[in-house]
Amino acid sequence: DADVTQTPRNRITKTGKRIMLECSQTKGHDRMYWYRQDPGLGLRLIYYSFDVKDINKGEISDGYSVSRQAQAKFSLSLESAIPNQTALYFCATSDAGTVGSYEQYFGPGTRLTVT
Amino acid sequence: KQEVTQIPAALSVPEGENLVLNCSFTDSAIYNLQWFRQDPGKGLTSLLLIQSSQREQTSGRLNASLDKSSGRSTLYIAASQPGDSATYLCAASGGGKLIFGQGTELSVKP
């Protein structure tokens, strides 16, 4: 089984709809991240969480919100989807560095299309 | 603000060639530098991670080096194969976050 899973893998939705992307991990890591990838713009950080009670905005958080339901679960919500949120979304995890190296491990991605 | 740049954006080589992919970063206060591989429409696979105290890391035909003073990292691929065709991304870690370059799209021709 994959260490970092994302659901759904593909989603098509309409403008104005609320949508949630979910991420689960079995690596036991405290830190979790959400990125989006756009052609020509690379990967950009949306939100990150260093533990269950810690949520931080990334580079491009406008229009998004997150919830850290447990150490293993981190979800990303689009409250009212718009077409320019069409992108490939990735969840990632890392250790906290005290015994590890902060190496990040990525999920398989969710391809979101907003029409 | 950290900025990461990868040159070239695309590279095409014949099978068997040794090649070097370049990554530069503007802020030398990084914790580590990570190289990833991404196949079209797929997720990221971590290839190598170099801690800030290290100079290089090796895995099979891959060798990555890090020179913090010059703000550069290179990924060396020996004896390239068609299966190496993918996009290679580097990312600099600071403050617990990764800043990505835009990647080098590699094509290895049989």
Image (tube, rainbow, N blue to C red):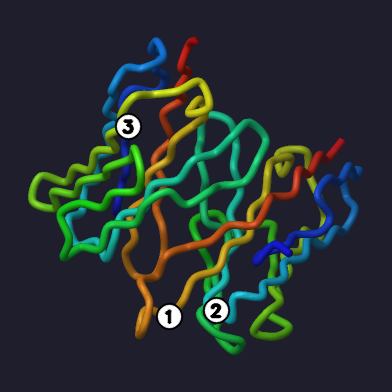
Q: Position of residue B60 (x, y in %)?
A: 35, 44
Q: As rendered, which of A13 and A101 lies closer to the eye?
A: A101
Q: Are labels 1 and 2 assigned to the same chain?
A: yes
Query: Which residue matches tag 1?
Result: A96
Q: Are labels 2 and 3 assigned to the same chain?
A: no
Query: Which residue matches tag 3?
Result: B77
Q: As rendered, which of B20 and B105 lies closer to the eye?
A: B20
Against B45, residue A4 (above or below) is below
Q: Position of residue B53 (x, y in %)?
A: 16, 65
Subunit ID for the residue under disc 1:
A
Which residue type does callout 1 highlight? Ala
**Residue for point 70% across, 85% down:** A70
Q: CA distance from mark 1 to mark 2?
A: 7 Å
Which residue type does callout 2 highlight? His
Q: CA distance from mark 3 to mark 1?
A: 30 Å
Against A67, residue A84 (above or below) is above
**Residue for point 48% across, 63% down:** A104
Q: Are labels 3 and 1 assigned to the same chain?
A: no
Look at the numbered discs 1 and 2 and tell me whether their residues touch, using CB distance below 8 Å: yes
